Amino acid sequence: MTMNLGKIGIWRWASGLNPALAAEVERLGYGAIWIGGSPPADLELAERLLGATSTLTVATGIVNMWNADAATVAESYHRIAEKHPGRFLLGVGVGHPEATQEYQKPYDKIVSYLDELDEAGVPVEGRALAALGPRVLKLARERTAGAHPYLTTPEHTRQARGILGTAALLAPEQKVVLETDPERAREIGRPPVRNPYLGLVNYRKNLLRLGWTEADIDNGGSDRLIDALAIHGDAATVARGVRAHLDAGADHVCIHVLTEDNEPLPVYQALADALF
């Protein structure tokens, strides 16, 4: 792991990110911002966030291989890396089959896309791969700096570390709800877990692989599953849940804050006090 992500970063949809928020996230002590969704190949948002900060790392979580051609992405990577050396991590992945009619042989697509990035001079240490299952985790270890799993648990982190070995980056996303009432927390956490992820084949397969049952996954997710995928409680409790990934072998955890009002900054502030 050569890039300095720090132990804790944030994951947020691109539509909710701006330079002012990035500056505040950096001030609070977070090490990285992960641009969620499928940012376009020009990577312009990453460049703006880097321009508003001085130490923060910006990562994509993730550039979708089906939507952003590798040649353009590579050009954008070099532009940003030259301007902000050591502070940009290119996260790439194939998304999920329901997202595109072109989705065929995803493993082959990953390999060919990484081949194109190689040819365009994007360094292995400058890129990470969205990975859940063993085969793609191994590819992340062999062809990139490491893996960025999404919608996982500390048990997945433990298993992924075993596959990745000790040297590769492991940076899982973890949804969090700063709410001590379990029912209220589930009202906030369940919708973004249920729609779309519990209906997507790759996430379902991963959860089943981890020992969850079809009954846990169906009908909006069992309370136990939602509590694991969108951990809730006071700041200290949430911080313990985040640190569980570090204890299981993660190098870095990106927290994905869920709120009723879509205003995450108060939660970032409260959790910073508990995490740092």
Image (cartoon, helix red, strand yellow):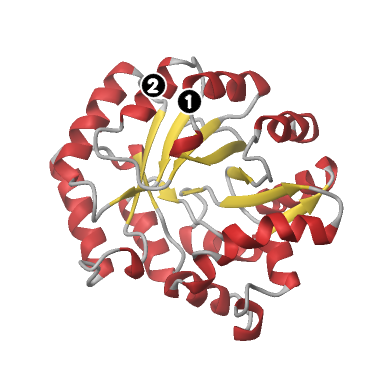
Q: Secondary structure at mark 1?
A: loop
Relative to 217, 58 lies left or right: left
Give the number of the mark in front: 2 or 1.
1
Task: Say if mark 2 contacts mark 1, CB within 8 Å.
Answer: yes
Residue lying at 51% horizontally and 24% vertically, measured from the top left: 56
- Disc 2: which residue: 48
Residue 51 found in image quarter: top left
- Disc 1: which residue: 18
Q: Amino acid at mark 2?
A: Arg
Residue lying at 59% horizontally and 22% vertically, measured from the top left: 26
Residue 203 spot, x, y in % from top left: 49, 69
| Mark 1 Cα-neighbour bin, 10 Å: few <14, some 14–19, many ≥20 | some
Residue lying at 22% horizontally and 71% vertically, measured from the top left: 104
Q: Nearer the viewer, residue 186 or 236?
A: 186
Q: Secondary structure at mark 2?
A: helix
Q: How many marks?
A: 2
